Amino acid sequence: MAVAVVFVVGTFKPLWLQQGARVWAPVAVAPLSQVQASGVTVQVAAASPAASQPLSEAARRAVPAIVSVNASKKTSERATTPHAQDPVFRFFFGPRQRPTQPQPEPSMGMGSGVIVSPEGYLLTNNHVVNGAESVTVQLADGREANAIIVGTDPETDLAVLKIDLPNLPTVTLGDIGQLQVGDAVLAIGNPFNVGQTVTSGIVSALGRTGLGLSTFENFIQTDAAINPGNSGGALVDIQGNLVGINTAIYSRSGGSMGIGFAIPIDLARDVMTSLIRDGQVTRGWIGVQPRDLSEDMARALKLSVSDGVLITGVLQDGPAHEAGLKPGDVVRQIAGQPIHNTTQLLNVVASLKPQSTVAISLMRGEKALEIPVQVAQRKPNPERD
């Protein structure tokens, strides 16, 4: 009977079925929630299955909140770049001394930024504004404003700026946990000062470390074209939500070669909150010199385990020394979190609250130990972690 009704309706009133189908079309807009901390209001996308939509729609949502940042610096403080001999680069920035070897270095002094709150807070890169005497921000709608530097964190290459303008557009913060390798993304910024530009690509890798770009590295790698001037700009997902702050490229020519790096938004958000609330980022420190442990090294040192981080040095009178850690110990866990490499150890220790006491699980020869360590506060760029 039901089949007969569908047949009759489909024959004489096909639009009825088409209209019904539209009712069940997937909704492309993810639900939003507002989060307020330390006087900063940001919109955060609620976790939801990715919905299919044109990339132009994602760009339309994000573009108004992406700004150009012009940092006026003393000539002696402007860094050299690997783009100095590129004629396009010299046209916009003037001649620079070319380094002896190529390196993944973004442009300095001219960059991009992202408005993340209606109170006027912006995220950008530290290297864009480092040493600046004054900072000017230009919005996508043509408005300009002088910006104050709220705080910087060289160890993640992040900076927070603030402008005072009404009716500011803002970007929605994405959920980094939903981002996967192969997802489509857009890079938005002001490359070579030609004007706001959108490029597309995919997430090439997650959790990139060991690049030497900053102390705390956990980069998103993308092949979306990123060029000098994109530094501090936005990496957004197909919903138009901010998932990263573009920070560097690897290039032998000065232009995009399909290898760009962005700081994940969860790290950027934590740094921003600390800078606004405390004026600095507070991190933990225990005073050890770690080294990745390979199977060959474990055999050569006759260690009983090959997974973990080898302690090669302990700073005298530091927290680890006071607790009894020794060179040759292999750290397996810190505060219950497994440790497989030096990057994990660095990040876990940095996330610990100073003056708190945590348990460090390690192997000393054949013996498994759990040693309580009182965490100290990390000073900028200490020699030991």
Image: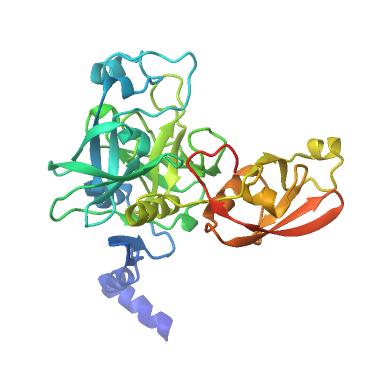
Can you give x and y, in whole percent of width and height, for residue 201 in the image?
41, 40
- Specify the quadrant that holds the C terminus: top right
Quarter of the view holding residue 128: top left
Q: Is residue 349 left or right of residue 258?
A: right
Q: Is residue 29 left or right of residue 323?
A: left
Residue at the (40%, 47%) spot, across then down:
244
Residue found at the very far bottom of the displayed protein: 1
- Specify the quadrant that holds the N terminus: bottom left
Q: Is residue 219 left or right of residue 76?
A: right
Frontmost residue, 256 versus 344: 344
- Can see residue 321? yes
- Can see residue 237? no
Can you give x and y, in whole percent of width and height, for residue 371 in the image?
72, 58
Question: Is 273 situated above or below 193?
Answer: below
Can you give x and y, in whole percent of width and height, for residue 122 in the image?
28, 48
Number of numbered tags placed on the structure image: 0
Question: Is 248 situated above or below 48?
Answer: above
Residue found at the very far front of the displayed protein: 317
Frontmost residue, 200 versus 43: 43
Quarter of the view holding residue 359: bottom right
Q: How is the image coloured?
A: rainbow
Residue at the (33%, 73%) spot, across then down:
10
Quarter of the view holding residue 25: bottom left
Frontmost residue, 304 versus 233: 304
